[in-house]
Image: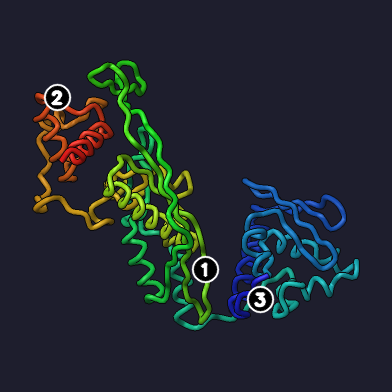
Amino acid sequence: MNTAPPILENQLQHERTARAQAALQSGDMQVMVLMDYTWTVASKSSHYTVSLNGDAWTCTCPDFSGRCQRFGLRCKHIEAVRLTETEKFAESGLVSLYTHPKFSTIHTEEHMTQSMPTHDPPTLDPSSEQILWRLRQPLDMNRVKRRQAPGQGTVPYLEGYDVIEAANDLFLFRWSFDLLSEPHIMRWDKAITFYDQRARKKVPVLGEDGKPTTEIAGIAYITGRITVELDGKAYSHADAGRCIFTGDTPEALDMAIAGAVTDCLKRCFRQLGEQFGNSLYDKEVAKTAGLENGASNGHGSNGNGQSEKSTGQTTPSNPPVPPNPPASQAEALQYRDGVAVDTSNAAELEAFNAFKSAHQELAPASREVLRAWVASRNGNK
């Protein structure tokens, strides 16, 4: 079992105890006895089982199995039981277990009474306190971008450069990112399809021989770990990143590996909470996040390593972003599957116009078809 620094442990435990008491007082959490020293703790959206075996507490919630058990803390469900079962513990002679728990030697009896302590819990050094306070603040939705998801919708995300800048600002460069594995690459043949408005489904793009056309698709995986310094101690989080790509060129593979590394970095930092986009995985938040600022950029398969800003890749001679076309012209700047061309993406607009010039002003069937056509041209050069 790992242990957190005593001051940090006390603060983290105090927060869980405070959340338990607040939930009990508001009625959002209820404790029900199942049998001797086994309880069900219920809220509006979940039910967890808390048990006491000798001097060891257990709970079936993710917080206990993923964090509390690892660092010697008690989750809010265990605290809810302890707060509601004070008299029962006293009558059964388990007061010593109640007031002197196995996992900590710094909590006092006043934490275990029905009334919470009036004094503030021990604090970290000022810089670490400031970091923890900032980590708990709501995410600024102006940082959120949106990208096309598989299908017809979009999903929110934070760009890689944004996560790095946030980490530098929060931890004053006292963090590191290490790769734990070599990249793993998987490839397969993928049929090129487009959405047929009349058939209302995706259909394959047929070649000159009447057969479905295919392209090489793949996915790159990599694992990594971030380490941050807080209160003089190092805390690490590991995760895996991935990036889907198409084409069999060195450029496509290079971008896929870079995208997987960026995705891994973001997923590791996500475990630090709100400031690194953890709330974007909430389905309700994801519906509207990034829409307020009109963000709809990033056309890669996972939003990593695919945009000009995140990869440093620029178009030849860096042409200026064209102004928004008039309504009549905007109607023409569409793929045949009905998806509009992103006129703010100079590279896509240039490729779209080049495709039309080469095909007697016929628009590409879909963005995927345009990408395959560009890749085939690059491969023939």
Which of the two discs, 2 and 3, labels the residue nearer the N terminus? 3
Q: Up-down: is 247 above or below 316?
A: above
Residue 236: mark: 1
Q: Is residue 87 above or below residue 149?
A: below
Q: Which residue is drawn at 28% across and 56% down?
A: 310
Instruction: First in sequence, mark 1 or 3: give its number.
Output: 3
Rendered location of residue 279, percent (x, y) = 46, 53
Q: What residue type is labelled 2?
A: Leu
The location of residue 26, given as percent across then percent down, is 64, 56
Residue 329 visible, this angle: yes
At label 1, the amino acid type is Ser
Secondary structure state at the residue bearing disc 2? loop
At x 38%, y 44%, the residue is 244
Residue designated by label 3: 117
Where disc 3 sits, the SS reads loop
Give the amino acid at mark 3: Pro
> Residue beneath label 2, please?
362
